[in-house]
Structure formats: structure tokens, C-alpha cells
Image (cartoon, coloured by chain):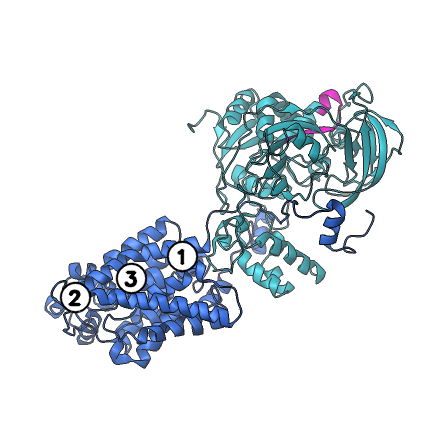
Amino acid sequence: MNKKPGNTSVKEELRLMNGDESHLPTVSASPHIRSHDTTTGIMLDVIVALIPSLIAAVALFGPRAFAVTAISVLSCMLFEYIARKAMKRQNTLGDLSAVVTGILLAFNLPSAIPLWMVPVGAFIAIVIVKQFFGGIGQNFVNPALIGRIILMVSFPTAMSTWIGNYVWGGGADAVTSATPLASLATIFDGNDFSDASFAQLPSNLQMLFGQTGGCLGETCAIAIILGMIYLIARRVISPIIPFVYVGTVALIMLIAGCGSIRFMTAQLLSGGLLLGAVFMATDYTTSPINSKGKLIFAIGCGLFTSVIRLYGSFPEGVSFSIILMNILSPLIDLATKPKPFGYFKEKKEKKEADA
Amino acid sequence: MKEKMLGVLSPASRAKGGVRVPHHKNTQDCEAVRFVGVETVVLPMLQHIGAPCSPVVSVGDTVGIGQLIGDSDKYMSVPIFASVSGVVSAIGIVQTAPGKRVEAVTIKSDGEMRPYCEFSPPTVNSREDFLKAVRNSGLSGLGGAGFPTHVKLNVPPEKKIDTLIINAAECEPYITVDYRECIENSEHVISGTKLILKHLGIENAIIAVEDNKPKAIEVLSKLAEKGKNIKVMSLKSKYPQGAEKMIVCSATGRKVPPGKLPMDVGCIVINVASVSFIDRYIKTGKPLVSRTITVDGSAIRHPQNVRVPIGTKIKDIIDFCGGFTEPPFKMITGGPLMGTALLNTDAPILKTYSAVLAFTKGSYKVKPERDCIRCGRCAFVCPMHLVPTDIERYVLARDPEKLIKSNVGACMECGSCAFACPSGKALVQYIILGKDIVREAGLKNE
């Protein structure tokens, strides 16, 4: 009994004290109760929030949309499994993060994409961006977005061939259509914000319901907003990033469009802005942790998106701007480190002492 | 149900952070039952924060209840008294529940529960008398930390204290001892508060209760009406509302800076059971020899509140409560968020233990540890505004400088972060390790 602690191993000590270890209660550090939140549960919530967009994608782009999503999800899961196995690490399929990446990657692809390209994007997202950096929680940029960007610069034609909405029962509508973003860039370059110049654009209502060209998951604004409401209500995401991001873009577009409301709303409803703001920019791993950081992050995303859309050679800037801000997140976190409770500056103390 | 009662204060401010925990106040209607049938008590010589006592009795001595058996000449120390009458059967090293090995006096009870002497109330004429009496009562904080009460009350004269906060928040799940104290000994709570106010020259007292205990608020506010300077405050039920810095913030709106104490912002925080005990001691002179604990959890046959002699073995108390329904998977002393896990039931009850909880395997959920997803929940709930996930990374990197910059020393180990963590990280463990890394590096925690 008088032995100094450390001379015997804990196990041996237990054996000496009790003879038999099998019926011993579990000893662990506090706290002894945990909340019901789990990583799997959070990912499941995100998947649920993506379902309206998936339904919209299939309704708008036909069965092919479902095929692209399924291939993307399956290949992401397969690559996750193989990569973990090859690196001799614990299997993490159960946390469902690969499923979320798979859906998001598919939502960032056009429906006409050759199907073999989908696993290429999945490989880049899961193996290179996520697992090479250590798996869930360690990637410094959003895997699905890098997957999309690599595909876009490698296969620019395939990645920007938009076909119009699928006509259910009437076969695929193979007409290639321009995205509203390209038209908006022309309008901005021409500096003509009269009603006539918006003639070739779909109406706001059409864009709200997604009846326009674009990637699978990005066109139907209503579905994305539904998902956002669900995520905020379940407290999975904080409303700061989506609202401030979209708000920043709205403000800049209003100024750039010389006060044209039509130009602003068209900018907000077209391209990947809503999808990016709700599902991509809010990714835990690649966005700042505290509210102040999230605010800076979201404003930065909005700025970059607007600048690329208005002045860049690419019509769309959402993925680039989120990636840029992802890279800045650790620095933002550092700069916005919260002060401990009750902290105050020395100066203030002096003032109080004087008073 | 939660209609506002007249005379009950609302919180002065709302502290950020904290988590909503399940309350499980199953024993709130269980009046404290006196424990009978004690055979031996083990009285460790260190039951408080500070210097250990040395035994002043030897093996074979006959002792009575309330007889001094351990004392120290150090300031940060409180005496220890025999909690049963009988014979000192052993003096030696024992292991207490947190795993500490300390000297202890074992007393074999003669079953008579005979007091050592006729207790007489201490004479209290001045502040010094009062503080001396508090020390001689053997009282160290009954809330859980075990800080010697006479040290807490002995505020240097240059610190002006204007508010005494009686902590009856009891934010930990399961535990109901403070609640029962408010209901059963409400008179003592109020008059104990008056005593402290009078002897320390403090103007106001706030009895802070979480709003999940409306009955306690009602009973206390009725009694407090007579004394104008004692007010009952209803606090939002949120863990860790009862933590010292949080309750000061909620009750007065003042924020205690890192590394400072409530007295630096003009407050003293004291546990409600301690206040009630001070009143009884000043009136009777009977020192601290017993305390009330909550015995609860799915593995306990008859959950209840029991008043036990200090030093009673946990095993005996569980037997008194009908024993286990099945071998427990997890046993805890104290609350489930800050309590200590028990390896066996041999350890004695100390002054600081407010509960013994035991859970069956079926009812106790273990969350497997996964990789951090940087969701930020730990930072969002941290009442001290720290970023536990960063601290974890710096601990794994063994980086004392970054740990200091992350203010690891400000952590009070409330466990909110680990409770909220979806990845089941043992964040509190990492933080404790982080404090050690800073200490080893010879740097000062701020």
C-alpha cells in the first residue's frame, strides 16, 4: 500500500487490489455525460438538407442528374474506403462525410458531364484533398470545390456545356443554353442596365425555381433555401456565413449595377452563389471557428465572388473565392482569437483606478 | 409554471457560453434520510484544498463524535473531527476516490454515536472571532471544491466587498442536496446569511437559485422578505451556472478577470449548504461531522438523499440505499460533469462529496472518440471564451508557449466543451495535460 504511485502499472495495481478486473467499473476523466450530437448526426443533417436540392436536380435535369449524384457519392465512398485502408487507418465511412462530399461534388457538375469524369473529381476531392492531408477535419480547402475546379480547368468544354431543362416524358432537351451569368457579364460590360438588356435572361421566378442552365444543385434557389432553414433550425450551421456572404454580393452588385435591382437579384439567383454560401462556405473544417472570424470570412467570400464575376475571365467566382478564403481561415482564426472571460486591457484598469 | 414571483430578482446579466444539460433531479422530493448502521469510518487528513492535517489521536484511543482527530498549524487548512464514537483502529495511508494517497484515521464505531462532549456555542463578538469559529467548525466548501471557508471569508481590508452571493444554483445533473438544504433548512440558510453579512460588514446578499427549482425560490424569498438586504435571484438553468465566475456575472453583471477572484470585483461566493452549516455551528457548536449526499443513478436500487457521517465508506451507503440493481458500469462521486470516476466502492465520503452516482451499462452511453471536425461547438459553449480544440492541438504538439497564448490556465474544467463535442473528444483531459505542460516548462499560467 505504501508503494509510490508510478512504481506499479495501473493494471497491475488494479489486479492487486481487486484480483479480477473484468467487473470493474469504467474510470475516465470528466465529464461523464455527453450530448447527443455526433459527427454522423451532423453529416446526416447536412444530407437531409441537401435532399430538396437533389429532388429539384432530378426534376430539372432528369434521371441523368440522379446518375451523376449516385456515381459521385459511390466513388467518394469507395475512394475514402480504399485510401483509409491503404494508409492503414481506421475506416471512417461511418461518419458519412464522404457521402456529403459526394453529393456536393455532383451538385457542382453540369448534368451533361461525361460520367467517367465524375470519379476523377471524386478521386481529387477525397484522396488528394482530404485523405492526403489527414482525413476528416484536416483538409485545408473544401474537397468538393477543388474537385470541381480541377475538372473545370482540365475539361473546360465538358464542364461548361449546359443543356436546358429535361422534359419529363418527352426525352432529353439537348439544346445547349447559356447560363444567366454569361449574359450578366455582357450586361455589365455593356454598362446598360435597362430592362431590354435583361430580355434574354430567365425571369426571377424561373431562376428561383431553377428553370435555367447551370450545375445540378445550384439552379433551384428555393430548394437550397429550404436546406438552409433546416440547417439553421437544427443549429448545424450559424446563419452568419450564408447571410453575410450573400449580403455582401448583393451590396456590391447593387453598386456595380448602378442601383439596378434586376441586375442584383439575377446575380444572387444565378450561378453557384446560394449553394456555395449555404453548403460550401459553411464547411466546419475550412471556415473560421468563432462568429467574428465567420463574419470576416463571409465578407471576403462576397468580395472575391463579386470581383471575379464582374472583372474575371471566368463567369463564375464562387468556388475560387471560397477556396481563397478557406486558405485564409487559419489566419482569420488567429487574428480573431477570443479574449478570455473577464479580460480587459491594462489601460482600462488605469482609467478605472483614476475615476 | 415559471411565473415571476414578487421580490425575486432577475439575473443582472447573461454570461455567454454554457450548455443545456439534462437535469435528472430525480431525488428532489426525497427528504434527507439519516444514515444508520455505520461500522467504520475512514477520515483522510486532507479533505480540503491546502495543507493536510496531522492526526492528533493514536491507535487504540477512544473517541466521541466531534472530537478533534486531525489538525494543522497552517493557515490554508481546516481541522478534522471524529464522525462516530468508537476506537481508533488504524492510522495509515489510504487511497481516496480521486486516487490520492493520504494519511487517514480509521475509527471503528461502537454503535453508540455518543458525542465527545456537551457542545457549546462559540463566543462570537468580532470579525476575528467569527472567522476563528468558522475555522474551528472544520468547514471547507461543501459545494465540491473544498476551499477552506475561513480563508474565503477573510478578505483583505483593501478589497471592498459589497455583495455576498449564496450559491444554490446546483447546475450539475442529479444532485439535489443544495435544493433540499434550501427547502429543509431554509431558516438556517437565511440566518446564516445574516450572520456572515453582520460579521463581515457586507451590505447585500443574493441567494442565487436556478429557475428549475421554483419551490426553493418560493420558500427562500418568503423568508428573505423580512430582511431587506437579502434577495433571492432566479437564474437561467444552464450549466455551469453555479461556477464561481459565472454566478458572479449572472448575479451582479461583473466579470472576474482571468487569474482573479470574486473578491476582486467585490463579491464573495459561498455554497448554500456551507452557509446553513455556519449558522448551526454558531448556534450549537457542533463541528462538521456529517453531510448530505445524493445517491442516484440507474444502478442504485433506491435513489435518495442521505445524511452520512463523513468518512463512511461508499460501499456502506450504497448498501443502505438498497445496493446495486446490477454491477455498475460507471460510478462517480460528485456530479456527472465535474465529478470523479470511482474505481471501487472502498473510498470514504469526504466533506466535498455531494453525490454518489452509479450507472448500469445499458443506461450509460459512451461516445467513441473520433477526429475533430472543427465545428467550433467547444468554443461556442466555453464560458471562459477559450478555444478547446486549439488547446488540444497545442497539447498534442507539446507547445507550452502556444498553450499560454491560448489561456489554458483560465479553464475551470467545467466540461462544457467535452459535453458538446460531437467527436467525443476528451477535451478536459487534454486541457489538464496542457496545464501540466505549461507547468513543466516552468512558465506561469495566467
Residue B45 is inside the magenta segment = no
Q: Which residue is found at the position 44% from the left and 59% from the top?
A: A94
> Bounds of the magenta span?
B281-293
Q: What chain is tagged by disc 1? A: A
> Position of B309 compared to B296: left or right?
right
> Position of B26 compared to B56: left or right?
left
Which amino acid type corresponds to the residue marked 2 in the rendered image? Tyr
Disc 3 marks which residue? A274
| Quadrant of the image occupied by residue B439 | bottom right
Which amino acid type corresponds to the residue marked 3 in the rendered image? Leu
| Chain A visual colour | blue
Which amino acid type corresponds to the residue marked 1 in the rendered image? Met
Kindly tell me whether residue A141 is visible in this rendering: no
Residue A166's label in the rendered image is 2
Rounded to the nearest angstrom, the CA distance separating label 3 from label 2 is 22 Å
The earlier-in-sequence mark between 1 and 3 is 1
Q: Nearer the viewer, residue A113 or A187?
A: A113
Vertical position of residue B228 compared to residue B268: above or below: above
Rounded to the nearest angstrom, the CA distance separating label 1 from label 3 is 19 Å
Determine whether the residue tagged by mark 1 lies in a helix, strand or loop: helix
Residue B287 is inside the magenta segment = yes
The earlier-in-sequence mark between 2 and 1 is 1
Q: Which residue is found at the position 83% from the left and 48% from the top?
A: A2
| Chain B visual colour | cyan
Tell me where residue B409 appears, x and y as whole percent.
63, 54
The earlier-in-sequence mark between 3 and 2 is 2
